[in-house]
């Protein structure tokens, strides 16, 4: 029996890792698709170093993620809802007892349900300003820490700087902006806080499942610097998904974090003292925002 349970948990962990592996395959397909599109429309040589336009690559990549992992996530949610309904239908006696208790207090079951019903849309809509402040504070904190460390250790951060330069550049690449700021958060939240966390929770305690998906989220970025802060952000997004019972608040926060990477004034980061000061102030703002955002609230 123990062996069967261990095998089942191992299988669930394997399922949790499959989305990450699939995302790498999607990235490869997206690159070659972008090469083909650029070659077809602009008649570029596919052997050239920049044969694939980065904006088109990101657009295809994250578009495919949304379709594949979004469908997977919604299928899993429907299955969970169906199981919950079946389990609920197996306890008619408890329902009758609750109705009797409500009748004894002079309240109808409809009135009781209406009072206890939680509206997640209204709840998270009220917290949208908090999500915006937290997202920008996190972006400033990470940017400040990286700016300070990269100034102190330029060789260690050279590859990371090249990556960021390719995303932001001297001007705005609107395809890249659209893909990174809006499509990437949706696809990645479906992938990690949706599908990966779903299977990880079946094999591990909740806190370890959140850590597991956060580590995979760090690996997904394939960069040591990004790995460190992606794990930290992945932990926050995982806790938020678990607390909300949905990936939607995480998608909103993820969008704000990615979008505000284009809105960090360079004057805040142009020397080490300024970068450190920015990171300290932003962290002081982000911490209480996290505490307020993750306060326990019953979903039902």
Image (tube, rainbow, N blue to C red):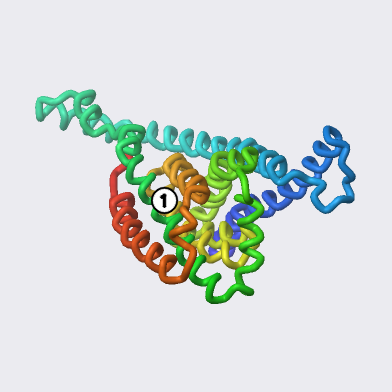
The percent coordinates of residue 124 (x first, y second) are: 34, 38
Residue 208, relative to residue 36: is it above or below? below
Foreground residue, 188 or 59? 59
How many numbered discs? 1
Residue at 23 percent of width and 23 percent of height: 110
Q: Percent from the top left, x then y, of residue 86?
A: 44, 34
Q: Can the viewer see residue 300 in this picture?
A: no
Residue 178 visible in the snapshot: yes
User: Does 185 sit left or right of 176 as displayed?
Assistant: left
Q: Position of residue 261 (x, y in %)?
A: 51, 51
**Residue at 20% across / 29% down in the picture?**
112
Of 101 and 152, the residue lying toward us: 152
Closest to the observer, 87 or 113:
113
What residue sits 48% from the left and 70% below the top?
148
Tell me the SS state at disc 1.
helix
Q: State the image coordinates of residue 16 (x, y, percent, origin top left).
A: 59, 54
Classify residue 249 by image quadrant. top left
Locate the N terminus by quadrant. bottom right
Q: Residues within 10 Å of mark 1 (few under 14, many from 20)?
A: many
Residue tagged 1? 136
Quarter of the image with the C terminus in it: top left
The residue at 66%/53% (across/down) is: 166
Residue 49 is left or right of residue 108, and the answer is right
The answer to which image quadrant residue 5 occupies is: bottom right
């Amino acid at each position: 029996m123990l062996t069967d349970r261990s095998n089942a948990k191992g299988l669930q962990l394997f399922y949790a890792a499959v989305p990450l592996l699939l995302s790498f395959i999607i990235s490869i397909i997206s690159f070659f698709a972008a090469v083909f599109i650029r070659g077809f429309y602009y008649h570029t040589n596919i052997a050239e170093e920049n044969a694939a336009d980065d904006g088109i690559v990101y657009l295809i990549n994250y578009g495919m993620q949304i379709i594949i992992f979004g469908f997977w996530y919604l299928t899993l949610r429907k299955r969970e809802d169906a199981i919950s309904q079946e389990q609920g239908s197996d306890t008619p006696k408890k329902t009758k007892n609750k109705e009797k208790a409500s009748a004894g207090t002079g309240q109808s079951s409809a009135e009781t349900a209406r009072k206890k019903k939680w509206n997640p849309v209204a709840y998270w809509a009220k917290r949208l300003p908090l999500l915006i402040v937290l997202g920008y504070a996190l972006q400033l904190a990470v940017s400040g820490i990286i700016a300070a460390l990269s100034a102190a250790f330029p060789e260690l951060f050279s590859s990371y700087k090249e990556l960021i330069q390719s995303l932001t550049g001297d001007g705005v690449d609107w395809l890249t902006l659209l893909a990174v700021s809006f499509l990437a958060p949706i696809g990645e939240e479906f992938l990690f806080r949706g599908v990966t966390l779903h299977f990880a929770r079946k094999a591990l305690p909740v806190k370890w499942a959140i850590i597991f998906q956060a580590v995979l989220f760090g690996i997904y970025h394939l960069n040591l610097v990004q790995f460190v802060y992606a794990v930290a952000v992945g932990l926050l997004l995982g806790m938020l998904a678990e607390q909300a019972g949905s990936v939607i608040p995480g998608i909103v926060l993820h969008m704000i974090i990615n979008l505000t990477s284009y809105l960090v004034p360079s004057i805040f980061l142009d020397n080490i003292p300024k970068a450190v000061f920015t990171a300290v102030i932003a962290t002081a703002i982000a911490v209480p925002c996290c505490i307020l955002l993750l306060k326990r609230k019953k979903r039902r």
